[in-house]
Amino acid sequence: MLKLIPFKQILQKRLLSAAGGGVPTMRQLREAIVKHIGAVPSTVSEFDPKVAHPPSASATRCVIPLSSDPTCQLRYVNASGQARSRFGMLMEDLDMFAVWIAFRHNQPIGLPMGTPGHHPMLIVTACVDGIDVPNKVIRSDLDIIMDGFISWVGKSSLEVTMNLKQKYAEQDLRDILTAKFVMVSQDPETRKSVRNVPLLLETGRDEENFHLGEQAKNLRIAREKNSLLRTVPTGEERNILHALFLKTIDESSQSFERHLPSGHVWMQDAKLKNAVICFPIKQNLYGKIFGGYLMRVAFESAWANACVFSHKRVRIAKVGNIMFRKPVEVETMKTAAGFDVEAAAKQLAEFRAHILVLDAMYVFMVMFGKKRLSNVTSNKLLLQDLSLLWNSFNAVISFVIAVLTFPDFVYSVFQGWHYMVCNVGTFMTDRYSGLGEYMFVISKIWELGDTVILMLRGRPVIFLHSYHHAIVLLQTWLTYPHVCYSSDELIQVSVAAQVLNLNTGEKDLTNTFQFTFKVDSEDETSVPIVLPKTYEDGILYLDGRRHALD
């Protein structure tokens, strides 16, 4: 029988002496996991479905001591020449941290880790639902505080929610990322699924997190059901592919010969393949290649591909839908558009100077042209007919714009106030709402005619009326290109891990990864637009588009 008391004393001593006033380091936690899984329980406990553990039982905090440990800092610093952390290393830590939290949830309350008190199980990563990176800077010279807990539990799967903060000062902790990992519990011998300890919801926050976890599970099921490997593209997606095809041919030549438009890149030329030899040192506790290592290699390959594709330094914006299953190669994809918002933005940008002159002329007319315009004609019947015709024209245009934008408006209402105010979503790129927005911007020019009609009829023009027309015209024309070009900084990269058995020559597609990169904000030029040339590339393009818009 393994003597566990000395180990418990050593573990407790290490945890108490760790950096951050009793908070263990990530390295110590890693060692503790190895000890816990390697320890032989004195008795084999059976699963008791009546026992439930609250999220607080699994809540754990650890620290990556970048500010105080030079060796640790050297492992995490990236190749930019600045004090920036390697995101791939953080993905490894997140994976290990999620395993610890999952084991801790199943461990009896009060029994320290290192003495397995749960029924026999091993825990592996099933998927990564998402990693949001709100802070574009993750420094390599400041401590990183990792907090995590179990937020949802199914029969054999668990959702682990982790938040990482960076310690700029004693009372200054800044969020750097939030991650959600889904873990699966298996029998060590048969590798069949085993039950987890149920989750006890003690607070309203616990119930809210559990509800979000249930929604995420349903979304994963729906995403799998509607996968492009199982279903045909939607009507909108088919229209997008056809529009992309028309972009690459000369319709006047009546030929199907393809050509690449300026500022575009064929998808087949935006691929990068990388071969990695999996040495035993990279295996996990169960003799398989460590999932965190695979995520790091996939991220670094995706980052390299995004940089080569864009000819710029990029940063990670989001990681989504990492699945441990079977896809194929590295693809770079960019958000597509049913409405050619890029062409519209460039067209409007070309006339900015003209709009500034027109706006100045409008202000001059309001200030000094009232008497001249009021004396142009005294025919009241003509002015009434002109006013009726003008208002009818504006009413028709407003109705058309309303019809085009109404579906997006209704959708945004159900997404909440934050989405309505802060998130452009697909409003600018959808073929209908994008056209409606473009028409709205153009309409600000002829709406200056409202003031002309008032002056011709000798009506007073209040300050608020003229101020509104002058400012809205400038605001819509000057900000439209800025909003549209923001999408041109995004690059969607899909990575597939394919394992080759050197003895048999068999290939096994094991993992898929989705990364969204953003060009550094200091460089405002847009990245090339990727175009599919074959149907296979078209399906990959649509899959990347779905993830980019998710």
Image (cartoon, helix red, strand yellow):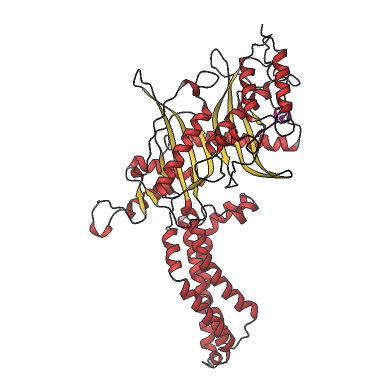
Where does the image place residue 474, in percent across and percent down from the top left? 54, 71
Residue stretch in magenta: 45-69
Is residue 524 found left or right of 201 in the rendered image? left
Report which quarter residue 146 is drawn in.
top right
Relative height, residue 422 to residue 21 (above, below):
below
In the rendered image, is residue 239 in sight? no
In the rendered image, is residue 243 in sight? yes
Is residue 467 found left or right of 225 in the rendered image? right
Residue visible at 52% across and 25% down? 290
Residue visible at 64% across and 11% down? 40
Quadrant in the picture for the N terminus? top right
Where does the image place residue 88, in percent across and percent down from the top left? 52, 36
Say if the magenta span includes residue 513.
Answer: no
Relative height, residue 519 to residue 478 (above, below):
above
Report which quarter residue 374 is drawn in.
bottom right
Relative height, residue 437 to residue 378 (above, below):
above
Q: Return the residue nearer the eye: 469 or 88.
A: 88
Residue visible at 43% across and 59% down? 342
